[in-house]
Each structure stands twice: as structure tokens, then as C-alpha cells.
Image: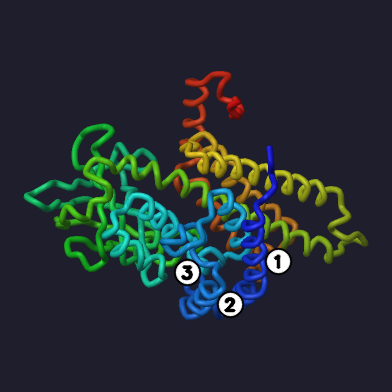
Amino acid sequence: MDFTLPARTEHFRARIAHFVENEILPVEANRDAWDEHGNIAHDWLEPLREKARSEGLWCLQLKPETGGQGLDKVGMAVCYEEMNRSIFGPVVFNSAAPDDGNMMILEQVGTPEQKERWLAPIVKGDVRSAFVMTEPHPGGGSDPGMMITTAKKQGDRYVIRGRKWFITGAAEADHFILMARTSDDPRRGLTAFLHHRDDPGWHIDRRIPIMGPEEHGGHCELVYEDMELPADRIIMEEGRGLKITQMRLGPARLTHCMRWLGLAKRCTEIAQEYATNRHGFGVRLSDRESIQIKMGDLAMGIEMGRLLVMKAAWALDQGSFARKEVSMAKIHVANLLHRAADVAIQINGARGYSQDTVLEWIYRYARQARLVDGADEVHQMVLNRHLGEEGRSFWTWPTQSD
């Protein structure tokens, strides 16, 4: 097994690290650069995005012909981890959710016309996007088979009715990928549609208040009241919506993990700095065995997360859906991020609980990690299903052919 990185990947990682250190972290440290929702304000964001574009660090995850650098999933894992050393990092490089996943799925399955109209403006950074799937009870959440938003075909158009909620980025999005039910077929019953903010027949009912900081555009509840869309708004074809969710959400879950590893490492960085310089009762904190045990355990947990993410990224690059690998990474890294923030706050004491560092921001943000893109328990059930089907083969290593 070869854990060395291609020189090109390491080159991008090093340049991103330099950019984050010298361009983004100074902005993050300036509270004037924050908006009211705990994210980077747009007038501070745009100059950073323009600089990232000019340095060739923009949309690394996309193909060159789309406007990116063609990094594979392993390369993305290395670079996304480095980007999220700052809480503002991913959005600067146009690698933040939900735009990240939406761009990758449109690049993969969109028609040339759809790519020109719906994908290119997101790639350029001219518009934001949202993925509209989750519904309030009794609709679909982690189980898209429960979806009750309908798209009824009437002539050459589809009439969409339903309610969605916790739709990330919706308040600032212009382009939307909407999942709706077109039949009761368990496998071919869902269809993915594209719609614009200005299309009539829908509205944002509310921006849902949450306990943590928010992405640009928040998390919103959307109502569709007889929205009419032409057939050319369908992605792939009618009935392929479940396939699209599978293609989009697996890699999207893993990109979350890539970014969360960067935040977990930032927590250890802040904790180490404080423990090295803080003395109490005649002893430096970093010399206390209790602190060393906490930090050593955290370092090990982060490395375990990196290995899980890398294995899943490698499997995706080999053409696998990597369902087991992504689920294991999602469970471990989501819990790791929460633990890293908690340990760092404990070491920093009152300073960690204050807004003098970003630890409290990360702590509030981290709690959602165990819920978004499938709760821990859903992924644990996925793993148990694979274990039941595969038995001892669950742990088989892939082998090279002779």
C-alpha cells in the first residue's frame, strides 16, 4: 500500500496551506469580517475568492474543461483538509457545501445545455445553489423512499407540490436541484429537477434558527405550490432521482469529513498553543500527564479519521460507491470533530468558552455533523446490513490481479 502523494497533489496542498495562513486566517481573526450568522461577510469574501481564482486554486475538484484542476477524490481529501484549517476556507476556494456537491453531480450527469445554464454560473461564483430533498414528517429524510413532494406530469410540464425543510443555502441560492416523486415505483419513483429562484410557484416559508453558525443562505423551509417546470429541467431522465441522490450524497458525505478533519486539526492547534504557554500551580499545562493523554488520544483519533477518509476516497476513485467506507468515515469523523472541539475548550478553560478563539464556533457547528447527510445511527445500520450480507468478507482487502 502506497501512502505517498503525487507531486502535483502536494503542490496544491502546500499552496492552499500558504493561502490559508497568509490570506484567510488574518480575515478570520477580524470580527468585522463576520456576518450576523457567523460566516464570512460577502464584501470580505469576494476579494479572497478573486485571489484564489488568480492563483489557480479555484474549484480544484472539477475537470479542467469545467473550470477546475481535475483533482481526484484522494487529492480532494488532502486539499479540503488543508482548506478547513480556517472556518472560512472552503467557501473561498468554491469547495463548500452545498455548491460543491451540486457542481460535481451536474458535471457528471448534466446535458451540455444544462451545464451551460445551471452549472457554469456556480463554477464562476456568480450564483449559489441548493439541494432540495429533506422533508418534515411524514416525508423523507435519511430515507428518500418516504418522499411525499410530488411532480405530476400535465402535458409537457410537471406540476410540483410539497414542502421541504433544512435546505442549506436556500436563502441565497439562485439554482436549485429539487427531488420530487413522479411515481410509486420503489426504485424509479423519484425525479430530480432544476429550477431557478425566479420560477413562480414556490417560496421560502422561513429561515430556520439553529444552534450553530450557518452557511451562507442558512437552512430554510420551502413550500412548492403548483410550480410548473418543463421537461428539460429534469436531470438525467424521469425516475432516476434515487440514482442521482446516491451519486451525489456519497461523495458529499466524504467531502464533509475531509473538511471536518481540518477543523479538528485546528482545535488541536489552538489547544497545543495554549497548553504550551499557560502555567498553573507552578507547572506548564503541556507538562501535565492528563493534558498529554488528552492530546495524544486526539492526535490518534484524527489520524484514524484521515485513514478512513483516504480509504473511502481511494475506493471512490476506483469506481466503487464505497458505501461501507463512507459510512465508517462519516461516523468516526463526525464524532471526532465534536470531541476535538470539546477537548480543546476544556484545555483552554474560560478562554475556550469565549469568542476569543474559534473553538466555541466549531463546537456549536460540530454538533450538526452527527446529523447531516445521515445520522450516526443510519450509517451504523448501513454497516450492519453489509456485515449481515458479507459476513467475514466484510473485512476483505482488495487484491491486484495477476
| Residue 298 vertical placement versus 225 (above, below) | above
Marks 1 and 2 sit apart, C-alpha to C-alpha, by 16 Å
Label 3: how many Cα within 10 Å (few below 14, some 14–19, many 20+): some
Q: On the image, numbered disc 1 is attached to which residue?
A: 351
Kindly report which numbered mark, 1 or 2, lies closer to the viewer in this rendering.
2
Instruction: Judge from the rendering whether residue 72 lies leftward or rightward of residue 106; answer left or right.
Output: right
Circle 3 residue: 37
Q: Is residue 245 above or below residue 287?
A: above
Depth order, front residue of 343/171: 171
Name the element at disc 1.
helix
User: Which is more foreground, mark 3 or mark 1?
Assistant: 3
Name the secondary structure under disc 2: helix
Q: Nearer the viewer, residue 276 or 228?
A: 228
For the point 28% across and 64% down, the residue is 117
Task: Quadrant for the C terminus, please.
Answer: top right
**Which one is nearer the viewer's eye here, 221 or 53?**
53
Outermost residue to the left: 155
Mark-to-mark CA distance, 3 and 1: 21 Å
**Residue, disc 2:** 31
